[in-house]
Image (tube, rainbow, N blue to C red):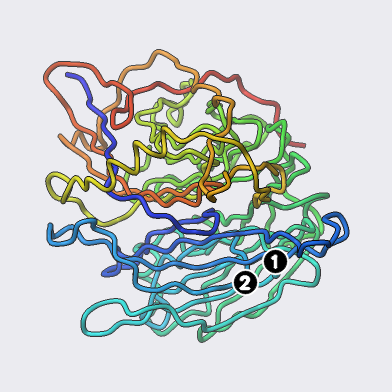
Amino acid sequence: MACRSRTRSLQLLDTELSADAVEWCPVPPWHDVLACGTYQLLKPPEGVDVESAVPSRIGRLYLFQFHEDGLHCPPLTEIQRIDTSAILDIKWCHVPVLERPLLGMATASGELQLWKLTDTQDGPSGLEMTSCMELGPDRLALSLDWSTGRGDRLAAVLPPSCSSDVRVVSSDSTGGISVLALGEGSLAKLSQWKAHDFEAWISAFSYWDTQLLYSGGDDCKLKGWDLRIGPSCPTFTSQGHSMGVCSIHSNPHREHILATGSYDEQMLLWDGRNMKRPLAETLLGGGVWRLKWHPTQEHLLLAACMHNDFHILHCQQALEGSGEPCSVLASYILHNSLAYGADWSRLPLTGAPACDSQETVEAERATLEMGVHLRIQYESPTASFDTSLEDDMGRYIPEGTQPSPVCAVEATPPVPAGHAPTLSCLMATCSFYDHMLHVWRWDWSLEESGEATSAEGQGGVDGGHGGAAEGGD
């Protein structure tokens, strides 16, 4: 019996500004709500020297609602757009706060903002800012994470009116880490310290013990912190990655399991009880900017790989101690620029896609066929990719170099968890220079015969090679 893995585009949207973060709401019954954040570096006025000009960055927050009833084609409807400072990261709190979904936002103005989702009788009406905390002067807030990652299991022990146990961690461009507490919808700073020599690209909680934090920086170091003993010394420092560490995600289903990604194009799986050596190492062919564990399937991991698209990984054998790279079950390759934002929706999909929009098909074809001379310069949130990528009409132009391929390794095709016959997932991804948001679905099923394949809409490539890296102090 073989597995069939297939991806299929549902809708493509132009976000106008460069898109770098996308998040489905994890709180029921708002699983159909999608937020997307953007980041744009403005060109200095004519006649002003580029080197001496103070950078000006703007952003926009979009809010959408997804419909799978077949009456909406395309299925995503814009609810709201809010002009903001440039956005580096957005994350929903995994549980309701004061009975409402709450969205956190890290901005280029160095602020951590909280936005509350409001409703009308007809559904979500929009976001309202409830709190704003400046992390410090002359810095960009680069990432955030909530202590609530175990979601429903935490909600069962957290009263609806109680938010005092909810905390947020944020990292910034000075290498700093800030931990904030949430009280009655407002933020209070608990602690702040210098964690990395250069930009601290990412910070994250251990969802199983929220006194434990992880951080990754441009100094190529992955560090652990225990809030009970204070930030004067990390609990470990790992140099398992050879370049800047830019993604960390604690597995909400398996205690001690951690996934990390880096500009070195490697995804490492760790057991938090032994940070000297990773459980497995997978080469993904592009800087691993974001990693997201599936909300219900403990072995599935979504990776946004900058220059090499988006990939769905199966990590079961690696987590069982095989030492082998993770299998890549599917790849979504229709984006034509840096792959930054990615998320799984908890919204169940029933049957086939609601529609095959001709507009979507034509947009896909045009995205893949574009190509003329380069003109305008942009800055990415990583501050590492400054490239002219638009023509005279303002259209995005694909980069001339091809991304590195995902390295393949022979592996037995895994099956959906619990031996379920099918698994269908709604996905959202966004890319930077072409300012595009894609909504797509991934279907994974068991078949009596045939082989899993890979193309646009077909998945089944196996994961990359990599040996165990030397770890921490």
- Answer whether labels 1 and 2 touch (C-beta < 8 Å): yes
Q: Is residue 249 above or below residue 64?
A: above
Q: Nearer the viewer, residue 338 or 461?
A: 338
Quarter assignment of residue 218? top right
What residue is at 79 percent from the left and 58 percent from the top?
Answer: 174
Front: mark 1 or 2: 2
Tell me which numbered mark, 1 or 2, is placed earlier along the sequence.
2
Image location (x, y in percent) of residue 375? 65, 44
- What amino acid type is highlighted by mark number 1? Ser
Give the vertical position of 243 relative to 141 (above or below): above
Crowd rating for badge 1 (residues with CA inside 10 Å; few <14, some 14–19, many 20+):
many
Secondary structure beneath disc 2?
A: strand
Along the horizontal axis of the image, is 354 left or right of 283? left
> In this orientation, does residue 268 appear?
no
Front in this rendered view, residue 312 or 39: 39
Q: Position of residue 139 (x, y in %)?
A: 76, 64
* Residue that label 2 marks: 112
State left or right for residue 320 relative to residue 284. Answer: left
Name the residue tied to disc 1.
178
Element type where label 1 sits in the image: strand
The residue shown at (45%, 61%) is: 36
